[in-house]
Amino acid sequence: MGKIVIRIIAAIGVSVFASSLFVVDEIPKIQSFTALGREIVNGAGIYTGDGQGVEEIVAEFLGGQMYWNGISESERYNRVLAENNGSGSVVVGQEEEALLGDIDISGQKALEENSVAAGSRAIRRSNAALEKLRSTLDTEYLWNHFYIVDSTTSVKKSLFPVKELLERDMTMKKKSGKKQILIYHTHGASEYFSDSKNGKIEDSVVGVGDELTKELEKLGYGVIHDKTRYDLINGSLDRSLAYNKALDGIKNILAANPDVKVVIDLHRDSVGKGKHTYTTINGKKSAIVMFFNGLSRTRSGPITYLENPNLQGNLAFSLQLKCKAMEYYDGFTKPIYLKGYRYNLHLQERSLLIELGNENNTVEEAKNAAAPLADVLHKVLSGQG
């Protein structure tokens, strides 16, 4: 029995080391180690999906969601709430859908408050959770009702000054003729929807990016839509290196376009079969959106080689967007997902990773989410509403 335990521990250790080479910029990818990592991980029975789709690829192991096969749904969304003094943590188990009660899991019951009779204009409504957050400025209330904390990371109160996050100025003055928003797709080649036609780019998350671009342009913003499929490397899917490749591409775009102040990495979530989630906005079925932040932290503390000087800006931006969505499009957003690594969000304070819909949504439902998402972005960037 002892030998079996030792072998399991050794296998996990080697696989973590081998797989970590996928995402560390400073260490080149070594084929023999990555192959060995895949072999050991598959043999050990560890789930290594990266939370963005394609579970069969060992992708960004250290930054990915790591679960044992057969883990329960409630355990998957456990949140680690570390005390401010760093003396341990409290694990709170709650299913994602129960956090705010604003998600229509079956898709059968439309959220009538989102069906606005007077055209497409959204109406602002009071939200009890948001009002309580504003009145109490309680960090633990914020964690419990606005976030899902992944098991790869930890949080502490000094990172979440509620008042400052809610009041930080995230507005951006429009500049005529200038490109100020960048939309790109780290996993553009591998994220499609339930009725997507095989290989049709317009039916993928890239096509949804086109729709979001159009909606933002209608609101007067200059937008760059980078359609590069960063997970398509040398003709093959390689999600493990996609973030590294995307980083180079984004840096080049930002260098050539210094007026860009908003950077959006648009994804499609992966939730498993049988979970067709949507809401109804203006009479249209719309996919649900989840904002995502990488904290550059493990469960034990900061990841020093993944420094993010814009972390507070990132957190303020996603929280303000979440709050605005709760007021105008209740049921449109899930709690914000917090994860351990950086995900290229360090380049701008208004950097945002968005999971729009999942593999069970239709292309139409995903594209229908573009207009309310653009409206929420506009309300925060303009300071209106």
Image: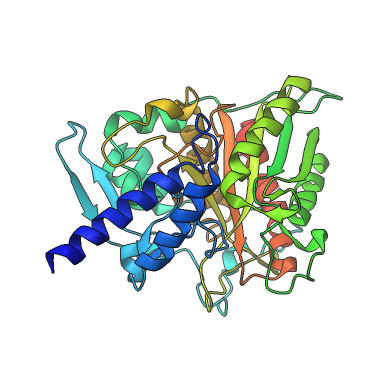
| Residue 202 appears left or right of 298 | right
Q: Nearer the viewer, residue 55 or 107?
A: 55
The answer to whether one can see residue 63 in this image is no
Q: Position of residue 118 (x, y in %)?
A: 74, 59
Above/below status of 146 relative to 71: above
Q: Position of residue 47 (x, y in %)?
A: 41, 64
| Residue 281 appears left or right of 26 | right
Above/below status of 363 relative to 186: below
Q: Residue at x 70, y 52 (%)?
A: 188
Q: Position of residue 248 (x, y in %)?
A: 67, 31
The answer to whether one can see residue 206 in this image is yes
Above/below status of 125 relative to 158: below
Display colour scheme: rainbow
Q: Residue at x 26, y 45 (%)?
A: 81
| Residue 24 appears left or right of 340 | right
Q: Quadrant of residue 39?
A: bottom left
Q: Residue at x 53, y 32 (%)?
A: 25
Q: Position of residue 87 (x, y in %)?
A: 14, 36
Q: Nearer the viewer, residue 289 or 58?
A: 58
